[in-house]
Image (cartoon, rainbow, N blue to C red):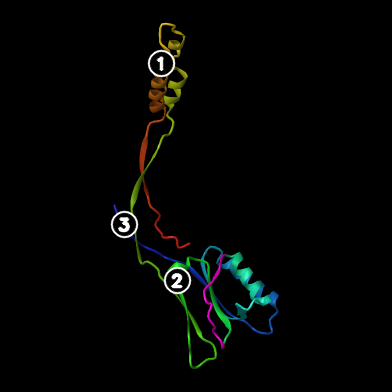
Amino acid sequence: MKLRSYWVMMIGILSVLMNTTWAWEIIVERMLDYLFCKYSRARIVVTGDLNVHFGSGDGDSTRLCDLTAAFSLKKMISVPTRRKNCIDNIFINFASEVSEANSLSTTEFNHSAVTLKVKIPLLVQIGHKKKSCRPITSEGLFNYFGLSWDFVRDDALDVNIKSDRFMQILKTNFEIAFPMKTYNVKDSSYVDLV
């Protein structure tokens, strides 16, 4: 049986407009508040004019990249967005193979625009599959307590016959104690992008 189900992806978007007079601690505090409290389980997009020169190796760039890496946020833009500097960026915490980030030149601003394209499947098929297990039964539990091993002491029986009989008793009683049960389960109703 196949069902159609709409798939919803919750994305929290933090658009950062850095004020050059802000202390670094204020910026970090605001980002941590957002990342921890507001959207701790969402797919997150952090974007904006971060006033950090990515790729230059300066202290602010390293600290910001370390902070975002702690939340599994991946930097998406690596080309210059203002003159020869990459200061506008997008960070995401979901699979980048389903996303496409670009920098677009604009004639009206001194910054390039950054865009993020996320491919979201509109319909997902939900199928059913069977799982099997062997739960113990009360009849089987009782059977194990009542097993007879008298044949082991019988000197007239060959050791191979004793071994075969022993294995047959175990197999038969195992199938009684732990009968195979099969049940249907639904596949996951969403596609995880991570």
Residue at which label 1 appears: 160
Is residue 36 visible from the viewing direction of this image?
Answer: no
User: Relative to 173, is 55 on the left or the right?
Assistant: right
* Residue 177 x/y as whole percent: 41, 27
Question: What residue is shown at x 45% (from left), y 10% (from top)?
Answer: 150
Compute the Cα span from label 3 to label 2: 27 Å
Q: The residue under label 1 is which amino acid type?
A: Asn
Left or right of 56 on screen, residue 93: left
Q: Which residues are magenta?
A: 72-83
Please report contact status of discs 2 and 1: CB closer than 8 Å, yes or no.
no
Tell me the residue that label 3 is attached to: 3
Amino acid at the residue labelled 3: Leu
Residue 110, picture quadrant:
bottom right
Q: Are discs 1 and 3 less than 8 Å apart at CB? A: no
Task: Write down the quadrant of residue 118 in the picture.
Answer: bottom left
> Is 74 a magenta residue?
yes
Which residue in the structure is indicated by mark 2? 99
- In this rendering, position of residue 44 left or right of residue 125: right
